[in-house]
């Protein structure tokens, strides 16, 4: 005899699997071709474990853990995966979120994809050249753009400006 509890449990399990598929992120790399493409082994050899988790697996760092959060010198923030310049220090600001924040990227630096993780829709930003996950962009930033690029600091490297640019 078919037990109603078994039926309900089966239906709930199917809904749970469907919800899990909807909630998980789809990496940008699956849909796009990038100028810099490497095997997983090559990325693991080049990046630190933390950089690999962020750039290649769409991870995130603990708030406040990146040294770039407190970086105040003039210079350029570049992708830790391929060194593409991403943001100027002139557009960095303190958002209070615990991650480096910028109100504008450099021209032709970022790509965007829809991110449906955690049951919400957000705009993920990734490096245009290598596809490395960098963070998300939100519409609660300062003027003049009103945007907040909330970026994982360990996904970037900082190149200070020369002595005459201070």
Image (cartoon, rainbow, N blue to C red):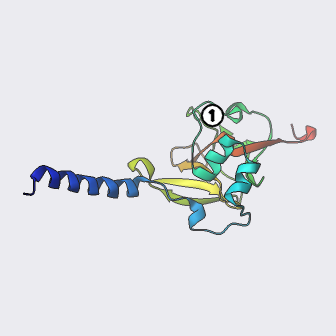
In the displayed structure, would residue 68 be above or below residue 33? above
Q: Looking at the rendering, which quadrant does residue 61 occupy?
A: top right
Q: Name the quarter where the N terminus is drawn.
A: bottom left
From the viewer's perspective, is 37 left or right of 123? right
Residue 155 seen in the figure: yes
Q: Nearer the viewer, residue 100 or 58?
A: 58
From the viewer's perspective, is 30 left or right of 21? right
- Residue drawn at x 62%, y 46% as measured from the top left: 54
- Residue drawn at x 68%, y 61% as measured from the top left: 128
Q: How many marks overall? A: 1
Residue 48 x, y percent position in the rendering: 72, 42
Using a 10 Å C-alpha cutoff, classify the residue at mark 1 as few (fewer than 14 neighbours), some (14 to 19) or many (20 or more).
Answer: few
Residue 118 x, y percent position in the rendering: 42, 47
Q: Name the quarter where the C terminus is drawn.
A: top right
From the viewer's perspective, is 123 left or right of 121? right
Q: Nearer the viewer, residue 45 or 88?
A: 45
- Residue drawn at x 58%, y 51% as measured from the top left: 57
Task: Kindly identify which residue carries mark 1.
Answer: 94
Residue 64 x, y percent position in the rendering: 61, 30
Q: Looking at the rendering, which quadrant does residue 163 occupy?
A: top right
Residue 79 seen in the figure: no
| The residue positioned farthest toward the right in the image shown | 164
In the displayed structure, would residue 123 be above or below residue 69? below
- Residue drawn at x 67%, y 42% as measured from the top left: 49
| The residue positioned farthest toward the front in the image shown | 1
Residue 94 x, y percent position in the rendering: 63, 34
Secondary structure state at the residue bearing disc 1: loop
């Amino acid at each position: 005899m078919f037990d109603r509890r078994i039926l309900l449990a089966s239906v709930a399990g199917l809904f749970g699997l469907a919800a899990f598929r909807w909630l998980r992120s789809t990496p940008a790399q699956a849909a796009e071709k990038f100028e810099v493409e490497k095997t997983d082994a090559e990325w693991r050899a080049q990046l630190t474990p933390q950089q690999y988790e962020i750039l290649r697996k769409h991870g995130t760092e603990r708030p406040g853990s990146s040294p770039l959060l407190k970086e105040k010198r003039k210079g350029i923030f570049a992708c830790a995966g391929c060194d593409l310049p991403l943001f100027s220090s002139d557009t960095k600001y303190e958002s209070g979120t615990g991650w480096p924040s910028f109100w504008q990227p450099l021209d032709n630096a970022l790509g965007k994809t829809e991110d449906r993780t955690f049951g919400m829709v957000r705009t993920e930003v990734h490096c245009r050249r290598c596809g490395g996950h960098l963070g998300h962009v939100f519409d609660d930033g300062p003027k003049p753009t009103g945007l907040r690029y909330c970026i994982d600091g360990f996904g970037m490297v900082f190149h200070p400006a020369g002595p005459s640019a201070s």
